[in-house]
Amino acid sequence: MGARFEVDGEEYAVLVFPMATSAPRHATMTPAEGEVVELALRGLSNEEIGAKRGSSPRTVANQLQAIYRKLGVGSRVELARAMASGHPGRSKR
């Protein structure tokens, strides 16, 4: 499963792999946040995620900000890199 998206004129492809639920980086992530991550990595917008989950786009944005703080990332691109690498954290530019 994967998604393609464009950020600042650069195209990214993200592959999504099932992750062990016991992985330490997910220990503090709520089930709702895990679902938001999954949908965001599929390339869905906040509006689309909200529609699927029955919440507002603002709620989704707030959940993404909480996820970014927990994983030490600052964007969807960094989130995708962190999840793909298996080592969440702010990516070096």
Image (cartoon, grey):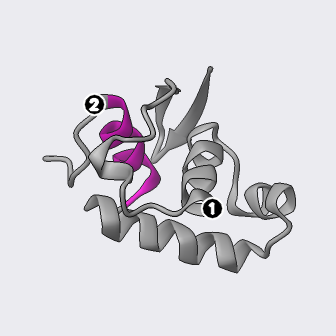
Residue at image position (69%, 54%) is 45
Residue at image position (86%, 67%) is 54
Dot 1 or dot 2: first in sequence order is: 1
Q: Name the dominant secondary structure of the magenta segment.
A: helix
C-alpha distance separating marks 1 and 2: 22 Å
Element assignment for label 1 = helix
Q: Quadrant of residue 62?
A: bottom right
Element assignment for label 2 = helix
The span picked out in magenta is 75-84
Residue at image position (48%, 45%) is 7
Please tell me whether residue 63 is drawn above or below residue 47 in the rendered image.
Answer: below
Residue at image position (20%, 47%) is 91
- Would residue 33 be visible to someone looking at this image? yes
Residue 78 on the magenta segment:
yes
Q: Quadrant of residue 31?
A: bottom right
- Looking at the image, residue 81 sits to the left or right of residue 56; the answer is left
Tell me the kind of residue under disc 1. Answer: Ala
- Looking at the image, residue 46 sits to the left or right of residue 34; the answer is right
Q: Quadrant of residue 19?
A: top left
Q: Which residue is mark 1?
A: 32
Q: Which residue is mark 2?
A: 85
- Would residue 73 be visible to someone looking at this image? no
Tell me the kind of residue under disc 2. Answer: Ser
